[in-house]
């Protein structure tokens, strides 16, 4: 039995976490076998690596160290959480995956998309998402949303300048062009319930095509 691996991607404050959690719970209530998880993190070791990467005091972190730490967290999460769930036929909804590394470290940090892809190949051994829901939002709107979210702890990447976040957005635009079949773009600047309905419809279409 093979499950379905769907990733949610996009810049800061696009609404990925909010929508993933709500949709995952609704689909579970409807009887689907859903695993909700996130990167970096999702399991103990990867959450520890997350703490190192996102700690706002770690300002001296080199870009390639950062890329390698994301890849290491990805590897552990993949073997411990994602692959076993897919093997038993679950639908895995994952908040960020390799495309975040390509957009943030590959493009915005300037390491190069292909170079970051190649270090990730070691980590993922060709396991790519079946589909990626890409939450497209203007950078200023996304950043305003996270600033307004007073419950959110500010992390090291949140503190990057506006230009960095603009490059992240540009990076995602390039990825959307590079992977047109896998990327499903959602206009995440819309009102939250509208975004939710669009994402739900898209995920159900993918489920019907791939699993039924
Ligand atoms: N469509 C929307 N309209 C207005 N506010 C939204 C919308 N979607 C999410 N929000 C709010 O924006 C904030 C950020 O949302 P969320 O954490 O889901 O984004 P995210 O994409 O996971 O961000 P990040 O990747 O930076 O953690 C939350 O306070 C959430 O309630
Ligand atoms: C997987 C991954 C993530 N990032 C960045 C993107 C965000 O700034 C943080 C994660 O925080 P979130 O609130 O859980 O979205 O990490 C990255 O730069 N590279 C990656 O591979």
Image: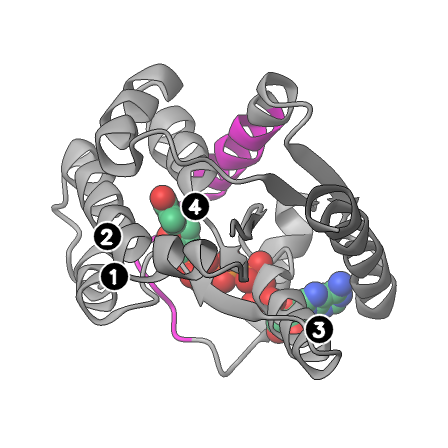
Q: Nearer the viewer, residue 20 or 26?
A: 26
Whole-number angstrom distance, CA of label 4 to CA of label 3 = 21 Å
Residue at x 36% of width, y 29% of height: 126
The residue identified by callout 1 is 50
Give the quarter of the image for residue 194: bottom right
Residue 41 among those drawn in magenta = no
N-term-proximal mark, 4 vs 3: 3
Query: Which label sits in the foreground, 4 or 1?
Result: 4
Label 3 near ligand 1 (CB < 8 Å): no
Label 1 near ligand 2 (CB < 8 Å): yes
N-term-proximal mark, 2 vs 4: 2
Whole-number angstrom distance, CA of label 1 to CA of label 3 = 28 Å
Residue 160 among those drawn in magenta = yes
Q: Residues within 10 Å of mark 1 (few under 14, many from 20)?
A: some
Q: Secondary structure at mark 2?
A: helix
Total marks shown come to 4
User: Start and end of the magenta stretch?
Assistant: 153-173
The residue identified by callout 4 is 97
The residue identified by callout 3 is 27
Residue at x 50% of width, y 30% of height: 167
Query: Which label sits in the foreground, 4 or 3?
Result: 3
For the residues bearing labels 1 and 3, Cβ distance under 8 angstroms: no
The residue identified by callout 2 is 73
Whole-number angstrom distance, CA of label 4 to CA of label 1 = 13 Å
N-term-proximal mark, 4 vs 1: 1
Label 2 near ligand 2 (CB < 8 Å): yes
Instruction: Residue 177 in the image: state x and y as whole percent.
Output: 64, 19
């Amino acid at each position: 039995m093979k499950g379905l691996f769907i990733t949610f991607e996009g810049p800061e404050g696009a609404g990925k976490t909010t929508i993933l959690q709500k949709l995952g719970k609704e689909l579970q209530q409807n009887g689907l076998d859903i695993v909700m998880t996130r990167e970096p993190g999702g399991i103990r070791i990867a959450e520890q690596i997350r703490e190192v990467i996102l700690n706002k005091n770690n300002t001296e972190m080199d870009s390639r160290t950062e890329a390698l730490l994301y890849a290491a967290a990805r590897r552990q999460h993949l073997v411990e959480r994602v692959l076993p769930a897919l093997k038993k036929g679950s639908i895995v909804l994952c908040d960020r995956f390799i495309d975040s590394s390509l957009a943030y470290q590959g493009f915005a940090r300037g390491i190069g998309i292909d170079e970051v892809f190649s270090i990730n190949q070691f980590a993922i051994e060709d396991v790519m998402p079946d589909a990626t829901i890409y939450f497209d939002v203007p950078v200023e709107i996304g950043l305003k949303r996270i600033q307004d979210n007073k419950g959110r702890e500010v992390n090291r990447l949140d503190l990057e300048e506006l230009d960095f976040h603009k490059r992240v957005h540009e990076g995602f635009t390039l990825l959307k062009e590079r992977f047109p079949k896998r990327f499903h773009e959602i206009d995440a600047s819309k009102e939250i319930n509208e975004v939710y309905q669009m994402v739900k419809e898209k995920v159900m279409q993918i489920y019907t095509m791939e699993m039924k």
